Image: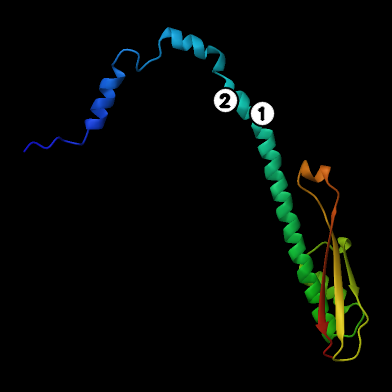
Amino acid sequence: MNVPRRCGGFLRAARRRSQEPGRGRATSSRQAGLAGHTGQAAVELALVIPFVAVLLLLLVQVGLIVRDQILVVHAAREGAREAAVEPAPGAARSAALAGSGLDPGRIEVDVSDRGPPGSRVRVTATYRAPTVVPIIGAAMTDIRLRASATMRVER
């Protein structure tokens, strides 16, 4: 029983087809029809690249704002924890600044009335997130982020 060899059979058939008339290299009449389309891909790429670049910069700016929001939530929690255990007026602000890593000139920390042990204290942190990414930052103003945390007063 003769079993045809499969290895190379496809390549031989493709080679035979490319040698048939009208296959393989383009004839001069086909080249003439494509003469006006040779730079189309380059032009399309040149038109699309600026939009893709702006989209990527916008994505980076959104990522930075989300990061700042997480840090603001963390600052509010740190401030609330410190206000719950320490009665000093500036303790919550200093704990919020130390624990967050945010710019101290852009953050405001408000502590609600702190009552006796067993009551609740609420700390609200407000941060003006800068828009620093090129092109996107110039088109947007600073974004105001806010977070609050409530904890039970322990001392």
In the displayed structure, would residue 32 be above or below residue 58? Answer: above
The picture quadrant where one finds residue 100 is bottom right
Q: Is residue 105 left or right of residue 27?
A: right
The picture quadrant where one finds residue 24 is top left
In the displayed structure, would residue 56 be above or below residue 13? Answer: below
| SS of the residue under disc 1 | helix
Residue found 12% across the figure and 37% down from its top: 3
- Residue 153 location (% of width, % of height): 84, 87
Report the residue that reaches farthest toward the front: 1
In the displayed structure, would residue 122 be above or below residue 69? Answer: below
Pointer 1 or 2: first along the chain:
2
The picture quadrant where one finds residue 66 is bottom right
In the displayed structure, would residue 148 be above or below residue 46? Answer: below
Give the number of callouts.
Answer: 2
Amino acid at the residue labelled 1: Leu
Q: Which mark is residue 47?
A: 1
Residue found 6% across the figure and 38% down from its top: 1
Q: Are marks 1 and 2 in contact (CB under 8 Å)?
A: no
Q: Is residue 81 left or right of residue 7?
A: right
Which sits in the foreground, 150 or 29? 29
Circle 2 sits on which residue? 41
Amino acid at the residue labelled 2: Ala
Q: Is residue 70 left or right of residue 114?
A: left
- Residue 54 location (% of width, % of height): 71, 40
Q: Residues within 10 Å of mark 2 (few under 14, many from 20)?
A: few
Which sits in the foreground, 59 or 27? 27
Tell me how far mark 1 sits from mark 2, CA to CA.
10 Å
The image's colouring method is rainbow
Q: Is residue 60 left or right of residue 108?
A: left
- Residue 128 location (% of width, % of height): 85, 58
- Residue 111 location (% of width, % of height): 90, 76
Check the picture and name the quadrant holding the C terminus.
bottom right
